[in-house]
Image (cartoon, rainbow, N blue to C red):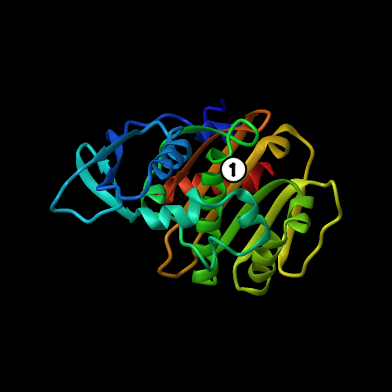
Amino acid sequence: MDANGPDSLRWFLSERDLPERTLVVINRRQPEPVQRLFEESFGALSVDIEERELPEETDDVVVLLEDGEVVATSPLEKLQNAVLYVNADLYRTGLSGVDKYEAPEVLTALDEMVFSLRGFPKSNKEKLLLIVMSRYIENRALTADGGRLDVAFQELSRIRDERGTETVYKRLAESDVETHIYGLPDITYERDGLDIHTGTDEEYQRSWFVVYTPDGSDADPAALVAIETGPNIWEAMWTYEPGQVGNIQQHIIENF
């Protein structure tokens, strides 16, 4: 690694000292298959998963604990709508996650952790969490209607082939967000309002990122970084720390 900074995007996927995190399903009244879906979806996130009966608390709620303290809460129904009862095609073909379903807070609050996630056919659910987080950051940019968004798709054809994705980026192109798209040039893709960057090196082939930095608004920065380490196997993390987001964006500007 260069002494002055990272020499690859993967450098940002470094372990950090974090509090002990636990996801707890409280007073589950949903059937057992729902719990199995929850464990299948979140079990790869290096957090403990528990069930607890607490008579004084609301039924069917999921909380995220850090060192035993509640830091995020989501109704189980919200996780069912956004993750458990859907597959990746719903996000690729429609606007779910931007307009219809919001990302569950117990997922978005799992920042700074490095995860290893698998896509289909090894897992039907794990990679979906990265798709949900991508939509979450895209929505942040759309809501702010300003700032800069940098997004890597690996192949540019994914924008055109995924109707829901193309709809999101058509809206971004029409917004005041400065949107930069990166990918392998397997197709020629142009759209007014989008800056297209192409390349064929390893970082283009293996990188998936969604990085948003606001510009004079009340919005907060956010970045998702994922590197494909094997066939449809990803190391990934997301962060909202302004300095880290800025460093990731600077690496992209200088190296992509």
Quadrant hosting residue 10:
top right
Q: Is residue 216 left or right of residue 173?
A: left
Residue beneath disc 1? 251
Task: State the image coordinates of residue 158 (x, y, percent, origin top left).
Answer: 74, 51
Q: Is residue 236 left or right of residue 111?
A: right
In the picture, the quarter occupied by the C terminus is top right
The residue lying furthest to the left in this view is 56
* Residue drawn 61% across the image and 36% down it: 119
Between 121 and 220, the one lying in front of the other is 121
Quadrant hosting residue 19:
top left
Q: Secondary structure at mark 1?
A: helix
Callout 1 amino acid: His
Between 118 and 79, the one lying in front of the other is 79
Between 111 and 94, the one lying in front of the other is 94
Task: State the image coordinates of residue 233 (x, y, percent, origin top left).
Answer: 61, 31
Between 161 and 41, the one lying in front of the other is 41
Q: Is residue 152 left or right of residue 138?
A: right
How many labels sit on residues? 1
Task: State the image coordinates of residue 213 (x, y, percent, origin top left).
Answer: 51, 58
* Residue drawn 35% across the image and 50% down it: 30
Quadrant hosting residue 184:
top right
Task: State the image coordinates of residue 114 (x, y, percent, origin top left).
Answer: 46, 33
* Residue drawn 72% across the image and 39% down it: 204
